[in-house]
Image (cartoon, grey):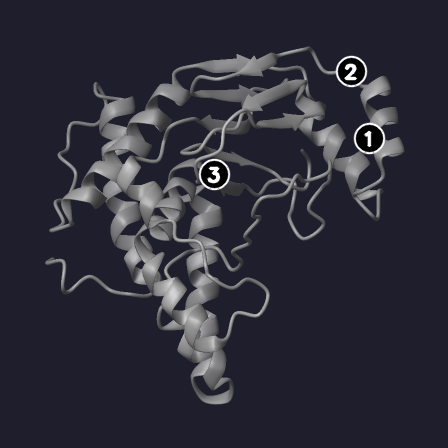
Amino acid sequence: MSISSLPSDYQLSNCIALYMRQQFFSEAFPEEYHWTPTPFDLHTDTTIGIRSIVSTMVDAYHNPVQSNVDLIRLEESVSRNESRLDLEWEDQFLITYPPNALGVLDCPAVILGWDDVIALWYLPNALSWSTKMQFDTPDISKDLNRDASLEWLQAMAVPNAMISGVLSIIHPPLYKVGIEGIEKLKTETALNNPIMARALVVWPTAFTNISLISNRPCPLHHDPHSSGNWYDITANVGDHSSCIMSIPTLGVELVYDPGMVVAFSGHLL
């Protein structure tokens, strides 16, 4: 498949995700998987970017950090908290179920719950320099007009597809459902929603939502639109320094420098 023939929609995610999965399993489990990743005629910068993300994921997978968080009990408690923004509730939960202090994390790792379920993937420096440059910041934010939105999606196609590739490795069923949802949307909107249909032509990811946070702190919060067994994925770009992502329910602080990717359930953590 040549560069010019690569699809522009969610099928781009499928191409890149397949390549990333093959590379991940051949590196993480070399004694079990002996195949060579299916070659695609990708741009050199894209190949380097994929290699950087996958290598960091392999390092993280082989560096498990054990926590004592009970994800099932946590999900039951969070589901009763309608706002998901109640800091008093958060404090009370931490008193009732205190996490073991994991401290500050600055190297690739996966954080495990008490039942060895992966609660969080921490991937510092996962994004190569060229990939970070592709994460373009729109000139306008909340007033994005339709043409500018589509241009931004097209410019962000490859890095967004890489993030989808991460999801295909850490949660294959969720990736599959996401792609199926995009396919269904594309079919249903072809006739009755031309605006969305136009956007889906260049929608390059298995995720149904992309959010941008620029130059502002975020208070502690839960994502009411997520689920306990879903992963939200954040990618951090820019030229800032000395930032921390704090996750009290895990008892951990993550060094939050540009190039970092982190995946966790925004509903629980």
What residue is at 33 percent from the left and 60 percent from the top?
A: 155
Q: From the viewer's perspective, is the residue at label 3 or at label 1 nearer?
A: 3
In this rendering, the answer to whether 231 lies above or below 177 is above
Q: What amino acid type is highlighted by mark number 2? A: Pro
Q: From the viewer's perspective, is the residue at label 2 or at label 3 nearer?
A: 3
Q: Quadrant of residue 168?
A: top left
Q: What amino acid type is highlighted by mark number 1? A: Glu
- Residue 50: image tag: none
- Residue 90: image tag: 1
In this rendering, the answer to whether 246 lies above or below 42 is above
- Residue 98: image tag: 2
The image position of residue 88, as x and y in percent, is: 89, 32
The image position of residue 211, as x and y in percent, is: 55, 54
Q: Which image quadrant: the C terminus?
A: top right
Q: Which residue is mark 3?
A: 236
Q: From the viewer's perspective, is the residue at label 1 or at label 2 nearer?
A: 1
What residue is at 15 percent from the left and 27 percent from the top?
A: 34
What residue is at 68 percent from the left and 28 percent from the top?
A: 71
Q: Secondary structure at mark 2?
A: loop
Q: Which image quadrant: the N terminus?
A: bottom left
> Which numbered disc, 2 or 3, marks the residue that appears first in the sequence?
2
The image position of residue 78, as x and y in percent, is: 78, 38
